[in-house]
Amino acid sequence: MVAKKFAVQVSLLIIVNLIVKLVWIFFIERKIQLLVGFENYGLYYSIFNFTLILGFINDPGLTNYLIRFLASKNENSFQIANLFSLKILLSISYLLLTLLFSFISGYSNFQLIFILIGYQILWSFLIYLRGFLKGYQFLNAEVFFSILDKFLLIITLVPLFYLNKNINWTINLYALSQLIAVLISIILCYWILIRHKINLFFNISFKLNFSVLKPLMPFAIFAFLVLAYNKIDVVLLQKLLPNGSLATGNYAAAYRFLDASNMLPILFASLFYPVVSKNIIEKKHIGNFIKPGLSFLIAISLIVCFGSWFYRENLMSLFYGAKSSKELANIFGFLMFSAPLIVIYYVYSTVLTANNNLKILNIISAIGLVFNILLNIILIPNYGALGTAITSFFTFLLIGLTEIYFYYRYFKQQNHLKIWLKVLLFGFLLMLLGNFVSYLNIAWIMEFSAFVVIAIIIALVLKLFDYKVLKGILNVNG
């Protein structure tokens, strides 16, 4: 009964986050970019990702350590106080180092930099406070605080966007509103903890015990490397071109859709990890469990990427109006081909993490980061943001194929050859389908709808969609 309740809570947490994030991406971020302009948003996007990459300094896994510590029913107040003291020291280190690297990197909008550094520090503290909610199993409160900051901004900004035309929106004002929303969330979260008689400020000691950081370092390095090869491209794009902020704005406008499409594999990985971990520990066969989820997610992502490619100009015009361009459409269309590769990454990295192959994952990620930087340096000067989209595709291809190789190496008898043959056939049929429906000579939205419906039918015929995936995802006990 407890496990079932946990499964429902986790599912609710992810679904609520899914809905709020979709609203955030398409009704807040998109609207802000249109209001402040692509160039200003591009500068914000570059600095935001720059401060995000360095976030591993701010929290190298302390929150996860805290959750495990509390879940063990250990009431050692000194240890909790030591963690909080470490948290303060790490945040100060993050502040100073990020300011230093910002100066070295040549960023000149110091007001925006200060706001975004402050946002990252406050966000990290909010995650830390939510660690107490998770550790003490206050799951309803965790669901609430997982969306509160964005929900506050949605209910505040949407009316202002459409009812008050007199506000002079700037990117600094937008960043400041994010910081304030997180600060309000922190205050309310701390108030909830106090009501439950949980005080994290007691017995603060500056005789710090750094030994807790040692076992966290492999995970911190992995988190940093993954974040770096995902986000370093926009920093390079903004720095390597004369019109870097505008190019980054175009890339951000296109990447928004890839970000939205990633939410389904993220949901899957979140629920999949505890199941596969348990099965590996119990030495059970995991191949048949992976298959339905893999085929389902790959099929969805292929429909998304081919649909995006064939209707790239129409979709960009629909969402960005006069700000759309052929260049933006091509960036978007090519970028979306990374969607199936990201599915592969989430599925196989989850399995390898559960199998405790963190050293291999760190090596793969380090190679991916170096490859990403070098290819960006080569392609960005010649192809701009399109070069970054191409780099993203090949980086995920390299990492995905390498992770598949190591999966087969560690799980020799659990291959998915049949699925990959179906996937190749499905991709070929989608390419033919996209070219065929373009000859129907009807409104593009009707063509697009026909493409999606027929693609789903083909996936069902090929048995890439399997009802077992839903059962497997929701059955957290495996």
Image: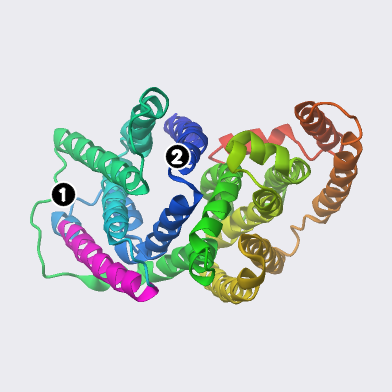
Q: Which residue is mark 2?
A: 35
Magenta includes 300? Answer: no
Q: As shown in the figure, which amino acid type bears the numbered disc 2?
A: Leu
Query: Sequence-wise, which precedes: disc 2 or disc 1?
Result: 2
The magenta stretch is 81-105
Whether residue 236 is visible here, answered yes or no, is yes
In the image, residue 262 sits, relative to residue 155, either above or below, namely below
Closest to the observer, 46 or 195: 46
How far apart marks 2 and 1 lie (CA) works out to 41 Å
Displayed quadrant of residue 323: top right
Q: Position of residue 431 (x, y in %)?
A: 86, 46
Q: Position of residue 144 (x, y in %)?
A: 34, 32
Q: Position of residue 93 (x, y in %)?
A: 24, 69
The answer to whether the residue labelled 2 contacts the one labelled 1, judged by CB atoms less than 8 Å apart, is no
In the image, residue 267 sits, relative to residue 225, either above or below, namely above
Q: Residues within 10 Å of mark 2 (few under 14, many from 20)?
A: some
Displayed quadrant of residue 191: top left
Closest to the observer, 320 or 229: 320
Magenta includes 86? Answer: yes
Of labels 2 and 1, the one closer to you: 2
Q: Residue at x 58, y 62 (%)?
A: 352
For the residue labelled by badge 2, is the local secondary structure a helix, a strand or a loop?
A: helix
Question: What colour scheme does the image use?
Answer: rainbow
Residue found at the far top of this picture: 163
For the residue labelled by badge 1, is the local secondary structure a helix, a strand or a loop?
A: loop
Q: As shown in the figure, which amino acid type bears the numbered disc 1?
A: Leu
Left or right: where 323 falls relative to 393: left
Q: Residue at x 52, y 56 (%)?
A: 246
Assign the magenta stretch its main secondary structure: helix
Q: Which residue is mark 1?
A: 200
Left or right: where 331 falls relative to 416: left
